[in-house]
Image (cartoon, grey):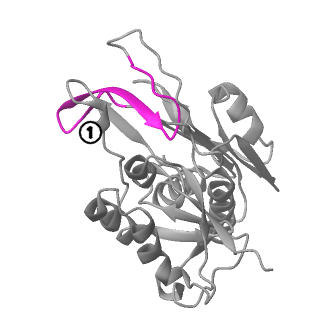
Amino acid sequence: MSFPAHITVLYFAAASTTLGITDELVPIPEKGLYLSQLTELLIERHSQSSLNTLRKILDSSQWSVDAEMVGDEDLTKVELKDGMEVAVICPVSGG
Amino acid sequence: MLPPGSSVEGVVELSGAVCSISYALDTVESTIKRVSDDRFGAIATFIGTTRNSFQGKAVTKLEYQGIKLFASRSPIIQSCITPAYTKLALKTMTQIIVDARNRTPDFRAVVQHRIGVVGVGEPSIVIAVSSPHRNEAFRTCEFILEEVKRKAQIWKREYYEGEDESEAEWKSNV
């Protein structure tokens, strides 16, 4: 018996406010998942949320995997694996 | 709402520089002492504080992915802590120091960013840079500030007078 693979998704700022959560365990489909496909999966998962808002936020965010930023041009190349920590990095406002 | 578990305090020490994220900032005096170096004749500091208005609206409180505090108008303090993505923000700040060294090798720096509630008039970021001469001190201090604003994984939410809290917007430096 194989256990389903999961990633941890971290939400900050507008993403966390919209969803009402700061993190969750998200199962990865057996056929695998690339980072570029994660937006659609999260939208499906949170279909009860304000979808337009969530989509706008995810589309305007960057992503990090295991605390390394992933360039927009590399989203289709990063395959998500069990145990990875993925964060939605909304436009930052430090300083 | 509970704060993200990844928003915690943290410090990274490099050779000649310290980057930290914390709920309280060190005093400016102690920060200056940390970058003081008998070989260097210049110390430049930057302190970023919370303004009381933005685009004409009065800011009542500011949440740095941290605690909500009603500043100045009301005595009510709520303690809902929502932090930065600290481990990545510190990595980013470390790389900024490395990038600054590629431009100007000789300096010492301290970069401290606060998380939690930052009331009006209070400092949210302190940067101190010492170097042989004033030119490098000013330029490196500015470089570090602009890069932190551009890249560090830290967020800020401003609450305005007369507006519903749930409508408070997360700011963006872009």
Rendering quarter of residue B165:
top left
Image quadrant for the C terminus of chain B? bottom left
For residue B169, above or below residue A3: above
Position in image of residue A15 (x %, y %): 42, 55
Can you identify the residue that label 1 sits on? B167
Tell me the subunit letter for badge 1. Answer: B
At 63% from the left and 52% from the top, the residue drawn is B133
Tell me if B21 is positioned left or right of B165 in this view: right
Closer to us: A3 or B97: A3
Closer to us: A17 or B70: A17
Closer to us: B43 or A13: A13
Position in image of residue A17 (x %, y %): 40, 46
Position in image of residue B149 (x %, y %): 47, 54
Tell me if A51 is positioned left or right of B23 in this view: left
Which residue type carries mark 1? Glu
Whether A20 is among the magenta residues is no
Part of the protein shown in magenta: B51-71
- Callout 1: SS: helix
Closer to us: B122 or A45: A45
Is residue B73 among the parts visible in the rendering? Answer: yes
The residue most toward the left is B56
The residue most toward the top is B75
